[in-house]
């Protein structure tokens, strides 16, 4: 089988080359999600990535950059030229993706798109339709619940409606988006199988003890309650570290200036974040569960957290399968008071108990949800009878 994966991404080598010394890095969660899925697909199929590098004018100083074709993780990356002018960039991305996909799509091919990469996804979708190939749409968020212009939301929904197959995060997504009953697979995410080569240890844990959050630093994701809850916990030998971009950063930075126990570390490369997570005592996801969007989401950070061997405290997310419950600490009271109480309870446990919990979660997530095993479910879907 041949997979054409059209997406805004780049190889890990190019990502480090472009963004290692840049303060404002593009969202590493999306980059890592697609890189791992591409590597997983490449373990069972031939994969060509029609890649639009995630650069903008704040990163790209040259007017025009053409990256050479390269192979990484078993996949061939074919880059659309990077252009500093946003209008010309959109034209090049659209035309480049369309013609690359059209050229590559043979009899055994299927196209995969990220439906939220609107220009890239639409161009690849049109090429797939012209070649009469299946087009699998990956939907990681509902367009109607994201910020953006009305046109961009309609465009993303258009792409979703016209895909032949879907990769979705939750069953609730399928109920809402897939009313035609097209083939689909539920993948809440995927862990990095290469983490099997990393061995967590108690000796590597930092002092003072560290509670850590990495991801979108937005108030709607419960960061305000997390910070207030940590302060209310008033644990002598502990600090709270937060990494990532978001609307809560200015307020968080002011709080961190006044409270030395709270550290905002800015944006790091994915590999740097993983190092911090492995050295932490507890990883926290305080995302509130009461909002409508939550039942359609599954934070990718949960799988990354679990793969590090550091124990995870998370709210009881509606989209989280119950099979995860034994491997994480569940936060049922999401208020600042509830978070503070739970942090005091967990950080009173012996280091060995916390470490054992983290190791059990790591074993589960790397065995059952690694990127090769998850990608195989997509390939299995495509190997079944033709989409309706």
Image (cartoon, rainbow, N blue to C red):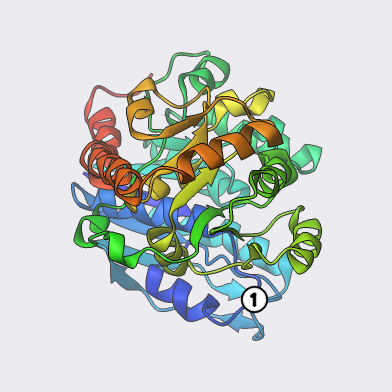
User: Residue 208: x, y in percent?
Assistant: 50, 64
Q: Is residue 66 visible?
A: no
Residue 302 falls in which quadrant of the image?
Answer: top left
Q: Residue at x 36, y 74 (%)?
A: 69
Q: Residue at x 46, y 49 (%)?
A: 282
Q: Residue at x 53, y 27 (%)?
A: 317
Left or right, 16 with reference to 230: left
User: Residue 220: x, y in percent?
Assistant: 72, 39
User: Residue 276: x, y in percent?
Assistant: 45, 64
Q: Quadrant of the C terminus?
A: top left
Left or right, 6 with reference to 87: left
Q: Quadrant of the N terminus?
A: top left
- Image height check: is 280 above or below 146? below
User: Residue 135: x, y in percent?
Assistant: 42, 37
Secondary structure at badge 1 equals loop
Left or right, 191 with reference to 171: left
Left or right, 18 with reference to 164: right
Which residue is identified by label 1? 23
Q: Nearer the viewer, residue 152 or 328?
A: 328
Q: How many marks?
A: 1
Residue 128 falls in which quadrant of the image?
Answer: top left
Q: Is residue 233 visible?
A: yes
- Image height check: is 230 above or below 206? above
Q: Nearer the viewer, residue 228 or 78?
A: 228
Q: Residues within 10 Å of mark 1 (few under 14, many from 20)?
A: few
Q: Nearer the viewer, residue 169 or 103?
A: 169
Q: Nearer the viewer, residue 310 or 164?
A: 310
């Amino acid at each position: 089988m041949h997979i054409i994966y059209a997406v805004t991404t780049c190889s890990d080598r190019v990502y480090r080359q472009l963004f290692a010394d840049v303060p404002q890095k593009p969202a590493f969660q999306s980059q890592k999600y697609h890189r791992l899925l591409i590597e997983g697909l490449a373990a069972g199929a031939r994969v060509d990535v029609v890649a639009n590098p995630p650069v903008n004018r704040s990163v790209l100083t040259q007017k025009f950059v053409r990256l050479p074709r390269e192979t990484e993780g078993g996949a061939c990356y074919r880059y659309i030229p990077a252009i500093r002018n946003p209008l010309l960039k959109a034209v090049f991305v659209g035309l480049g993706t369309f013609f690359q996909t059209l050229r590559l799509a043979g009899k055994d091919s299927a196209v995969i798109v990220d439906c939220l990469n609107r220009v890239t996804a639409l161009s690849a979708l049109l090429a797939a339709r012209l070649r009469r190939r299946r087009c699998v749409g990956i939907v990681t968020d509902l367009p109607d619940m994201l910020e953006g212009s009305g046109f961009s939301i309609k465009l993303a929904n258009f792409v979703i409606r016209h895909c032949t197959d879907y990769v979705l995060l939750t069953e609730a997504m399928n109920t809402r988006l897939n009313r035609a009953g097209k083939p689909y697979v539920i993948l809440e995410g995927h862990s990095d199988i290469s983490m099997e080569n990393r061995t967590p240890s108690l000796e590597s844990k930092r002092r003072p003890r560290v509670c850590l959050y990495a991801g979108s630093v937005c108030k709607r994701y419960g960061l305000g309650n997390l910070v207030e809850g940590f302060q209310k916990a008033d644990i002598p030998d502990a600090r709270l570290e937060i990494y990532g971009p978001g609307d809560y950063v200015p307020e968080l930075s002011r709080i961190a200036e006044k409270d030395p126990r709270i550290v905002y570390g800015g944006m790091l490369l994915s590999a740097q974040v993983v190092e911090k997570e492995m050295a932490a005592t507890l990883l926290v996801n305080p995302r509130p569960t009461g909002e409508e969007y939550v039942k359609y989401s599954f934070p990718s950070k949960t799988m990354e957290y679990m793969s590090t061997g550091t124990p995870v405290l998370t709210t009881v997310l509606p989209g989280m399968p119950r099979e995860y419950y034994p491997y994480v600490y569940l936060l049922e009271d999401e208020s600042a008071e509830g978070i503070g109480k739970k942090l005091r309870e967990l950080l009173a446990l012996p280091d060995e108990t916390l470490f054992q919990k983290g190791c059990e979660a790591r074993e589960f997530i790397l065995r059952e949800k690694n990127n090769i095993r998850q990608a195989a479910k997509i390939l299995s879907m495509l190997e079944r009878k033709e989409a309706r």
